[in-house]
Amino acid sequence: MRYLTALLIVILALPAGAQQVPHSAAQMQLSFVPLVKEAAPAVVNIYAKIVRPGRSSPFAGDPFFERFFRDSRRGQPQVQNSLGSGVILSADGIVVSNYHVVGEATDIRVVLADRREFSARVLLGDAESDLAILQIDEAMDLPFLPLRDAETVEVGELALAIGNPFGVGQTVSSGIVSGLARSGAATGSGRGYFIQTDAPINPGNSGGALVDTAGRLIGINTSILTRSGGSNGIGFAIPADLVAAFVRQAKAGRTEFERPWAGINGQAVDADIARALGFDRPGGIVVSGLHPASPFGDVDVAVGDVITAVNGQPVNTPSEMVYRMSVTGPGRAAQISRVRDGAEETVEVALVAAPEVPPREERRLNARELLEGMELSRVNPAVIAEFNLPLEADGVLVSDPGPLGRRVGLRRGDVIMAMGDVVVTRPGEVATLFSQRAGRYDLMVLRDGRRINVRFRT
């Protein structure tokens, strides 16, 4: 009796319009069923086949041992099968998935929830963002999910993760949005800005949908933070706004994602930096370096300035700033809020791709030149962005060391700055110095931000 009395008190205490105690079997069966029925048909399983060339024999190129191992110059091709998920974004078969699922695939099969199968091809992919846009062949009137503006997503919202974990078939898990603006927290190939969720994301869920209670796509599930290999309640999804930017570029005919180039180095403003700058709280990015060709320099952004927002949205890490610039896209302008000497100002920055100035002057050393097969490029802003080089890098990039270059200790991404006491900036200068000198070579090389010496004899 006392339980009924307590229940009556609770019901009478409910304000007008509040959710009432269910009075029928239908009301007691309230669930995610209608939402899943609407959203699940647009989430697909993806089976991808990747054919990788066999490894070269360690004796390839050796003038003595190669005679005895001619049939081992290259091993048999290796076939790898990849399993993941994807989301249909339009009725004509545009699909988004993770790059690590389909990016290098030679054969892609897309299986819908109703068991229909289609072949698909990659329109645009990007390993850094871990996103790929596919086109299903001969697709018509397919179910799809609408995109939601990720800036409207809030911590605490209910969310469903739909995918194909462990290859067992389509599965739905529920949770909430547990964090926003997660930068550099995800594992795998994706880098940047993520939505965090506690909805379980397991192997095979990659590329699947994170949807809200209205059936709108808010993110693409990409990775988890784990020590055991299983889901521990911290998963990451790529926001739908970045997916929309990928779709725009794919429909425009691009095969590689083009992100705007900032040409600046920045550091997050922590408590110590905020105190030194006289801020009342940490926030923003203090500019620590600026490339001469940076578009930020054109609007008088300088070292020591603090960038606090892009298009009115706060930024607190360099990755977050790059994300917001990428969402806006090249060819447009962004409103940048910056603080200098305690005064805040908004400037308009033209978003452009990293310029190919000066030209790369790509060159591959031939059989008559030392280190045959090595590929060289002149360093410019586009090369700096592509190979993630320091802004101050200058010299000749080793884009492919070739077998002989690897043997003497050079690696892909090395920047040859000088040979002996001669500074080099163009591939032709490296080739000329190789031909003029004989015996002993001493190269000054920039590798992973550090200067090292590579010495070898011929």
Image (cartoon, rainbow, N blue to C red):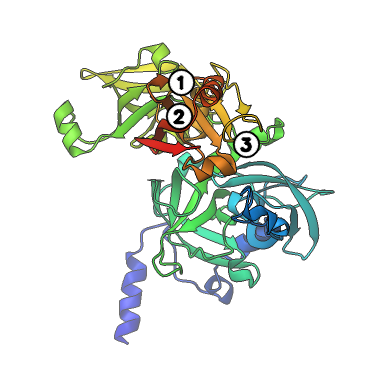
Q: Which numbered disc, 2 or 1, marks the residue that appears first in the sequence?
A: 2
Quadrant occupied by the N terminus? bottom left
Picture layout, residue 29 above or below residue 262: below
Residue 435: % across, % down: 55, 24
Describe the element under mark 1 as helix, strand or loop: loop
- For disc 3, the marked residue is 373
Residue 76: % across, % down: 71, 61
Residue 50 visible here: no
Q: How far apart, in angstroms, are the residues tagged by discs 3 and 1?
A: 19 Å
Residue 261 visible here: yes
Task: Identify which residue, 57 or 55, lies in the foreground.
Answer: 57
Identify the amino acid type marked 1. Val
Task: Identify which residue, 335 or 364, lies in the foreground.
Answer: 364
What is the quadrant of residue 40 in the picture? bottom right
Q: Report how many numbered discs are placed on residues in the image.
A: 3
Q: Give the crowd class for mark 1: few <14, some 14-19, many >=20 residues within 10 Å.
A: some
Identify the amino acid type marked 3. Gly
Picture layout, residue 245 above or below residue 103: above
Task: Identify which residue, 378 or 304, lies in the foreground.
Answer: 378
Q: Are marks 3 and 2 in contact (CB under 8 Å)?
A: no
Q: Give the crowd class for mark 3: few <14, some 14-19, many >=20 residues within 10 Å.
A: some
Residue at (46, 43) in percent of width and height: 409
What is the quadrant of residue 427 in the picture? top right
Q: How far apart, in angstroms, are the residues tagged by discs 2 and 1?
A: 7 Å
Q: How far apart, in angstroms, are the residues tagged by discs 3 and 2?
A: 16 Å
- For disc 2, the marked residue is 416
- For disc 1, the marked residue is 424
Task: Identify which residue, 174 or 356, lies in the foreground.
Answer: 356
Q: Is residue 435 left or right of residue 92?
A: left
Residue at (35, 63) in percent of width and height: 14
